[in-house]
Amino acid sequence: MLNARDLRFGFAGQPPILDDVSLSLEAGEWLGLNGDSGAGKSTLGQLLAGYLTPQAGTVTVDGAPLPRRGLRPVQWLPQSPELAVNPRWRVKRILEEAWTPPAALREAFGIEPDWMNRMPQALSGGELQRVCVLRALAPDVRYLVADEVSSMLDPLTQLDLWQGLRQIADERQIGVLVISHDAALLQRLCSHRLTLSDGQLYREPPAEQPDAQIATAPRQSPR
Ligand SMILES: Nc1ncnc2c1ncn2[C@@H]1O[C@H](COP(=O)(O)OP(=O)(O)OP(=O)(O)O)[C@@H](O)[C@H]1O
């Protein structure tokens, strides 16, 4: 289980954005997170992945603190993929940075062989986003924080992306925190959702009918 307990975080010289924030994400669970722009959702995502360090509180995976080096068991996928790649690397090197995704998965994510030799600037934002999502799915990755990852994709490509992610997350029991302003998307993907407001997390009522095509398994135990 990914566990965040009593997190407090503020950027240097600023009041805390997050104050005593706790959440848990089980293996294989899909949890939604929304909140106003600037509420601190991406900040929370980066704390969960270990890109930022909380001023108070802990983040653990199965009771152990996040590792300081090596592959991150919690991967944060940001909204802007161009900021998450080395602009001097070709797409093949970017995609295969941590593992070599099999052909079937490349196909499921709509990744074309002829992109491999291009520089990342020669892909569209949506194409590069799919490369980044697949790159993050190395075998030892346990949790994903998908931070507005599909907002730049057309509806069909969005569906492909979420279905591809759903398949691999179900197979490997990866837990996914989906951050989005799109309430309908969160309802479709996640049986449980949280809202971040004024530095605190609030639980939303359960979705009545998660999308049958990409529905997540129900939670095993109460939060
Ligand atoms: N590196 C930084 N230094 C100082 N302040 C920052 C930094 N990064 C983010 N902030 C501020 O922290 C607050 C929370 O930002 P964050 O990106 O976490 O919000 P968000 O909820 O993800 O917003 P959005 O929905 O617009 O993406 C914002 O007020 C933002 O301006």
Image (cartoon, rainbow, N blue to C red):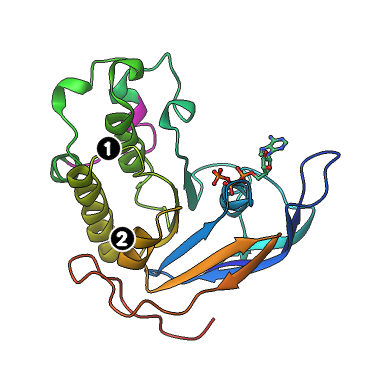
Judged left or right of residue 126, residue 177 is right
Q: Which residues are magenta?
A: 94-102
Q: How many marks?
A: 2
Judged left or right of residue 148, residue 157 is left
Task: Decide which of tag 1 and tag 2 comes sooner along the chain.
Answer: 1
Overall secondary structure of the magenta stretch? loop
Q: Is residue 192 visible?
A: yes
- Which residue is more in the foreground, 89 or 188? 188
Which residue, given by chain and number where applicable, does mark 1 sit on? 100
- Residue 170: quarter of image: bottom left
Q: Which quarter of the rendering shows the C terminus? A: bottom right
Q: Is residue 85 magenta?
A: no
Indicate the amino acid at tag 1.
Answer: Thr
Q: Position of residue 104 (x, y in %)?
A: 13, 45
Judged left or right of residue 101, residue 219 is right
Q: Position of residue 121 (x, y in %)?
A: 35, 16
Residue at the spot x=34%, y=51% of the render? 139
Q: Is residue 5 visible?
A: no
Which residue, given by chain and number where applicable, does mark 2 sit on? 169
State which image quarter holds ligand 1: top right
Q: Is residue 96 magenta?
A: yes
Q: Label for residue 47? A: none
Indicate the amino acid at tag 2.
Answer: Ala
